[in-house]
Image: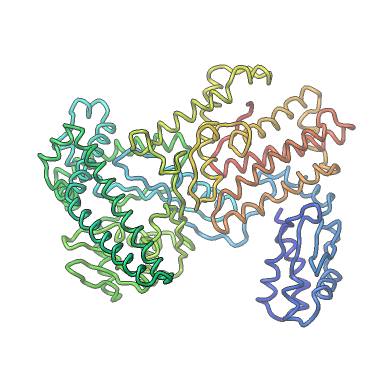
Amino acid sequence: MQILSLLRERFAAVLNDLIDNPQLVASSLERIVPSREPQLADYQANIAMPLAKPLGKPPLEIAKSVVDRLKLDDVCETVSIAGAGYINLKLSPKWMSRQLNNATCDDRIGVERTTDPKTFVVDYSSPNVAKPMHVGHIRSTVIGAAIANTLRFLGHRVITDNHLGDWGTQFGMIIYGYKHFRDESAYQSQPVAELSRLYRHIQAMIAYQEAVANLPKMDANIQQASHRVDLAKKKLEETPQDKKAAKELQAAQNKLQEAHDDLAAKQELIAQAESSPTLLSDAKMHPDLNSAVLAETAALHRGEKENLALWNEFLPRCLDEIHAVYDRLGTRFDYEYGESFYHDLLGSVIEELFAKSLAVPSNGAICVFLDGFDAPMIVQKQDGAYLYATTDIATAMFREREFEPDACLYVVDHRQSEHFKKLFAVLEKMGYQHTQFKHISFGTVLGKDGKPFKTRSGSTVGLEPLLDEAVERAWAVACDPNRLQVAGIEMDESEKRQVAEIVGIGAIKYADLSHNRESNYVFDMDKMVQLEGNTAAYIQYSYARTRSILRKAETQEWAREKWETATIDLQAPVEIALGLQLIRFEETLKHSMQDYLPNVITEYLFDTAKLFSSFFDQCPVLKAETEAIGLSRLKLTHLVGQTLKVGLDLLGIQVIERM
């Protein structure tokens, strides 16, 4: 049920006769869009005014010429011209009814597979396996899964790859911590928890040592910034009307404030570390810890026996922990090729870069210099170590060879934008121009204070405890005894647990996906689990409501076989509006994938649920005026439920039969 394609096809037949320029025809067809004023039209074609100059005719004359030739009698109830030449299209309720009837007989509810399938590699989630997943991973995981699900549903070949961080410096930290600070009994009883503690301990010590080492430099930065402020003030005093001098003073004052803020942050970090006798003692006993960690990492990469054995011992346990979270989220990947998978390919990356005259020795390192960037991409350090950039190039080369993708989507937060711009520029210079490489960036999860979401102690919020809290909140809302009693629903503890888990996990996913992925959003658990508003619970409740109506119909001898063979007949205005909304599902999915924005789907589901609520209030289903009308509305109710179910499924969210 792709209305836009049908309408544009009919317009194209006319425009190709009127216009000799194919590009002008194509741009005109893009101007056929859903109407912003649904009371006037369902779709609108703003083609006449842009064509006035190329065709040398008044817009109204062009619009009339197009309308006279259009063949839309089978699709549209009315085709009219408004204003200076807008062509308004009102769809025929009978035509819409036929489309909906066809959709009820289709598992895909009328969504056609693309006639031009592409191969997509979707790279998402990608946690460092040596530490627990945290709230920051939820965005990449749910956005990537929603994009992959939707592309696959539309008929594309989709390959999902979880590019695990299983070979980097974090393992050097854990190996060093294991050798020097492990609690053996804790490791034996809860190995992953102990490894996580060791990672945090090493990380905190390195941060403390670096902060102490940087204090003189930060003091110098403040002195330099203060000197620039004095110079800027003097200049402004000499030329008080000079706007440029005023801006320079403001910029200098901002830099000075930033320098003071940086120093204050480091001083606070130092104070926190020094308040822990154990951390302070360990940091003094192990000076230059960062170098020691890098040495352990280098030993692992060289394949030294002890470190490689520890890595092989740690990795499966870390992966088990991560997979337990993925199981709970319902997340699956086609491949999980971590950084370690590409390690043996990194030397050939450097060779190819040299062979294509892209790699250049610089201060002992190997770099690729790129136009438009202040700094080069470093692919091998002075000590011979490779970097993330090298691994990413090797990964792209491998995917190109194995999958031959048309597009490779990297679902990674916006802070990596510069890295991906460089990566894509290098790949283009290497000749990988068949694949469209695209960074699907996303914003930050914020707390209610508007700052990155942290625990009260300032540490990153773990993902699994967050899921537990969401389930508890969902239990309190969805399984509230008073609410269930009023609804006439009896649930045993097992069903309540299932409902709470589905609603809780769905709440977190939907809250993330309902925001434009490029925006930051505030994590508010109270709002996420509400049964009203734009939440997963509201959509899930709307689905459960459709199921309840169909179950009640069975008790009134309106068996499924009866309404399945009935005909949807859209009559009331709210029925027609709901029918149009259902027909637009395929259009919505395609629109959401133009810029890979899952929030387009959440908006559609929310609007559908609201329309269904209005339909239910205004159009009696089980007490309809006639049996034919009741059966028509039952069939429409069923299609609403199926559309909500498929839509939520694409977002990775389950539905509930009773709620």
Q: Which residue: 60% across, 30% down?
A: 656
Q: Considering only vertical position in the picture, is 359 above or below 644?
A: below
Q: Quadrant of residue 356?
A: bottom left
Decide if residue 445 is on the left or right side of residue 656. left
Place of residue 570 in the rendered image (x, y in percent of width and height, measured from the top left)? 83, 44
Place of residue 90 in the rendered image (x, y in percent of width and height, measured from the top left)? 82, 56
Q: Quadrant of residue 22?
A: bottom right
Q: Quadrant of residue 52?
A: bottom right
Q: Quadrant of the C terminus?
A: top right
Res. 174 in view: no
The image's colouring method is: rainbow
Q: Which residue: 67% across, 66% down?
A: 30
Label tally: 0
Q: What is the residue that sits farthest to the right in this orientation?
A: 626
Place of residue 380 in the rendered image (x, y in percent of width and height, measured from the top left)? 23, 63
In the image, 534 versus 69, the foreground residue is: 534
Decide if residue 526 is on the left or right side of residue 637. left
Q: Which residue: 25% across, 41% down?
A: 269
Decide if residue 179 is on the left or right side of residue 532. left
Q: Considering only vertical position in the picture, is 46 above or below 298?
A: below
Place of residue 152 in the rendered image (x, y in percent of width and height, measured from the top left)? 55, 51
